[in-house]
Amino acid sequence: MSKRRNVNRGYMKLVVWQDANTLYGLTYTIFGKFPFELRRVASQQIASVDSVHRNIAEGYCRRSIAEYLGFLNYALGSLGESVSATHVYRNASQLSDSEFEDWDALAFKIENGMKRLIESLQRKRNTGSWDDSFVVKESNAMYGAAIESDEDES
């Protein structure tokens, strides 16, 4: 993981995001070897799983809890789409039992983690304990500018 950290990249600490990242890699490994005639199916599955980690990140980067919850629900929806497809592909013998089990176990873990995260955020929303401020403490020296206070401007 990158050593570049700030409040906007905090989603990288979320286990659901880390697992979604892993699920994308596993999906690519499995579906990237689908035969040519199933390229569209494989592409849709990879894109659907790609949407999961992206929506977790985008929601996290929003300041509004309503937006964050909305993006988490999009991620959960994309995951549901992917789970459905994986079950169908297994039933059509397009996935081996071991590929299916590995993939489905991780997807199941993410589904449950997402539900817990959503429930936790809903509690924060309902109790009014969500902090939507975006306070960044940094030095302007890194930009080569002097730090001016409000008093200097008057």
Image (cartoon, rainbow, N blue to C red):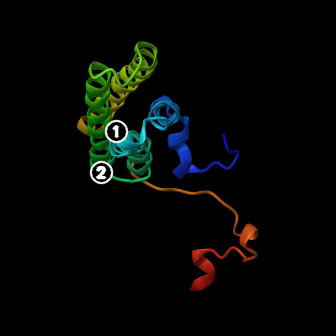
91 relative position to 51: left or right: left
Name the one closer to the observer, 5 or 152: 5
Residue 67: image location, x then y, percent = 30, 51
Give the residue at x 27% y 32%.
80
Query: Dot 2, crowdedness within 10 Å: few (<14), some or many (≥20)?
Result: some
Residue type, numbered disc 2: Glu
Name the one closer to the observer, 112 or 153: 112
Residue receiving disc 2: 67
91 relative position to 62: left or right: left
Regarding residue 114, the answer to whether it shows in the image is yes
Residue 37 position by quadrant: top left
Q: Secondary structure at mark 1?
A: loop
Q: Is residue 89 above or below residue 131?
A: above
Q: Quadrant of the C terminus?
A: bottom right
Q: Secondary structure at mark 2?
A: helix
Q: Is residue 88 above or below residue 31?
A: above
Give the residue at x 39% y 51%.
132
Residue receiving disc 1: 129
Residue 1: image location, x then y, percent = 66, 39
Q: Residue furthest bottom?
A: 154
C-alpha distance separating marks 2 and 1: 16 Å
**Circle nearer the N terminus (2, 1):** 2
